Image (cartoon, grey):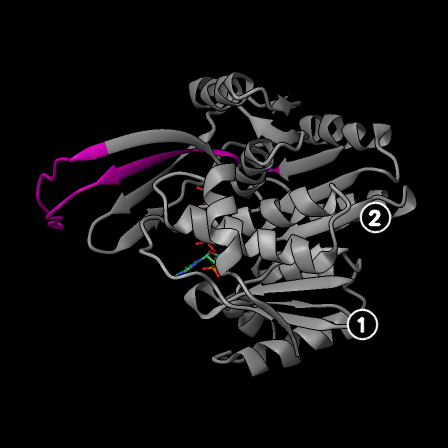
Amino acid sequence: MIYTVTLNPSVDYIVRVEQFELGSLNRTSEDSKFPGGKGINVSRVLKRLGVESNALGFIGGFTGSFVADFLSGENIQHNFIKVSGDTRINVKLKTDVETEINGVGPSVSEEQLNQFLQLFQHMNQDDIVLLAGSIPGTLPTSIYQKIMTICKEKEIKVVADVSGDALKEVLSEKPFLIKPNHHELGELFETNIQSVEDAHKYAKQLVKQGVKHVIVSMAGEGALLVTDEFSYVANVPKGKVLNSVGAGDSVVGGFLSAFSDNKSLEEAFKIGVASGSATAFSLELCTKKEVEELLPQIEVFKI
Ligand SMILES: Nc1ncnc2c1ncn2[C@@H]1O[C@H](COP(=O)(O)OP(=O)(O)OP(=O)(O)O)[C@@H](O)[C@H]1O
Ligand SMILES: O=P(O)(O)OC[C@@]1(O)O[C@H](CO)[C@@H](O)[C@@H]1O
């Protein structure tokens, strides 16, 4: 089973405003609400690509019920720990540019954290755990490392899609896969990554440190998959970007769907990139049909 962990889920409130004016009353031309948070997006992409997962994390209040009910409605398994505050609402404002305002999220008590950690006791080496997204302020910053230590004892593969300090923390536990974008990779090495060559050089360093697979997404500039045996670079298909929320999560979801279906790493990488672009080119997360349509446009080369 693939377990996706979203410590701080959200309701993503997506609003389109045609002529946005700061300091004025603006009215939306379109708005919609979806369950959000990076792990939850990965679970939804996996489901669309025909792969089961179980979404874990903390939810609370009416917004938390929305998240749980929405996932149940899509037949996605979930096992969230309930907290007393409301799950956050993240505003995704679509004007001529995209602006995001992410909430803080509810508090998690020590008892709720322990309840959550108990869930890992039932997992085994056939499982994959995905850790994705920010850590709520009330949880220790070492929480991802703690989960990874439990997973290591049980020989569970860990995929981490995290950034900033959390990324630094998970590296020491040698994850199976990480997927930074080129900005996040640059931040880690305190540098500015501007080319595929730069991204390759720094991703290689992470592999030397023990990370098994590194996918670096570079938005419209392509993507890389780096392992200790080989490195692949992929182009991304051409199209109009309508929504970048969840595009990175879709790369992870696409890759994991194919990997768990025993496809080659090269094929899994291609499906990951196609899924990312299919989400970027649509208003919501990618569908299987959209991914399949883009797949022939993606070429992968060894570098
Ligand atoms: N301009 C684009 N053209 C084609 N595909 C794109 C474009 N921008 C993003 N994508 C797709 O989305 C994937 C993820 O994009 P990006 O590198 O921006 O990751 P991210 O920052 O993690 O994404 P997110 O916007 O979800 O945070 C890319 O690998 C690609 O497949
Ligand atoms: O605040 P975090 O946890 O870093 O990111 C949360 C979030 O922006 O990430 C997802 C897109 O990747 C959205 O569904 C969600 O709102």
Quarter of image, res 116: top right
Name the residue at 59% across, 35% down: 43
Name the residue at 65% across, 37% down: 4
Whole-percent x, y for residue 3 in the image = 71, 35
Q: Nearer the viewer, residue 209 or 147?
A: 209
Tag of residue 82 = none
Q: Is mark 2 within 8 Å of ligand 2?
A: no
Image check: 191 left or right of 16? right
Q: Nearer the viewer, residue 259 or 172?
A: 259
Q: Is mark 1 within 8 Å of ligand 1?
A: no
Q: Does the CB distance between marks 1 and 2 fall below 8 Å?
A: no
Instruction: Report the span colored magenta.
Output: 6-30
Asked if 224 appears above or below 19 in the picture, the reply is below
Tag of residue 149 = 2
- Residue type, numbered disc 2: Thr
Quarter of image, res 170: bottom right
- Mark-to-mark CA distance, 1 and 2: 26 Å
Disc 2 packing (10 Å; few <14; some 14–19; many ≥20):
some
Q: Nearer the viewer, residue 178 or 263?
A: 263
Whole-percent x, y for residue 11 in the image = 42, 31
Asked if 73 appears above or below 300 in the picture, the reply is above
Disc 1 packing (10 Å; few <14; some 14–19; many ≥20):
few
Label 1 sits on a secondary structure element that is loop
> Residue 25 in magenta?
yes
Label 2 sits on a secondary structure element that is helix
Residue under label 1:
229
Name the residue at 43% across, 46% down: 279
> Residue 96 in magenta?
no
Q: Give the mark toward the camera: 1 or 2.
A: 1
Whole-percent x, y for residue 237 in the image = 44, 60
